[in-house]
Amino acid sequence: MTEETLAEKVINVGVAEYYVTHNPHILASYGLGSCVGVALYDEKKKIGGLAHIMLPDSTAISRPGKPGRYADTAIRAMVEEMEKLGSRRRDIKAKMAGGACMFTIPGATNPKNVPGPAIGMQIGERNVEAAKKALRELSIPLVAEDTGGNYGRTLRFNVSDGKVLISSIRHGSKEL
């Protein structure tokens, strides 16, 4: 199926959300700047999930809120839902996009608990590293990524075949 035939089945995964399905939907996250989109896919069962991760670590916040907001909780929650639908962890693979440095703060210094230079506090880079750490902890291989830079992206994940299309105004489109 092409995206056109699935047009009515495109599901927008907004900031700090995740969605898991075993139906032939296209899961889309728009405007990935410093946020990271993580697509998980089980090719054998045709089960997939997409998270639009906003922040790296739920443990740094006293009241974390929605699990989709953080790399550590969103990825774990998606894996658990995929397993409930019949996936085995060893069959799940990941693709990721986003994590850009969208702005700098002239003259800013980092808070004492944030390592690195004060380039927008490196939230995009920290999101990418946190997502990779969560995937490693769950033994989920990251098979493709389009991360970093200083530009936004849109991610479209076709659950029927596992293909991830990344598009950007400045850099065109590519398939992961």
Image: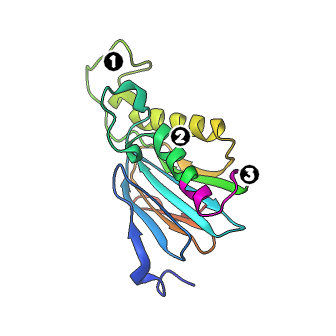
Decide which of 80, 38 is in the foreground and name it. 80
- Mark 1 lies on a secondary structure that is loop
Amino acid type assigned to the residue bearing label 3 in the image: Arg
* Residue sitting at x 40%, y 21%: 117
Decide which of 34, 105 is in the foreground and name it. 34
Disc nearest the viewer among 1 and 2? 2
Amino acid type assigned to the residue bearing label 2 in the image: Ala
Would residue 131 be found to the left or right of residue 15 on screen? Answer: right
Would residue 27 be found to the left or right of residue 46 on screen? Answer: left
Residue 15: % across, % down: 34, 52
Count how many numbered circles sit on residues in the image.
3
Decide which of 87, 7 is in the foreground and name it. 87
Q: Does the CB distance between marks 3 and 2 fall below 8 Å?
A: no
Residue beneath label 1, please?
Answer: 110
Residue bounds of the magenta highlight: 81-90
Q: Colour scheme in the image? A: rainbow
Amino acid type assigned to the residue bearing label 1 in the image: Asn
Disc 3 crowd rating (10 Å Cα; few below 14, some 14-19, many 20+) is few
- C-alpha distance separating marks 1 and 2: 22 Å
Q: Quadrant of residue 65?
A: top left
Q: Which of the marked residues, 3 or 2, is nearer the chain's N terminus?
A: 3
Residue beneath label 2, please?
Answer: 131
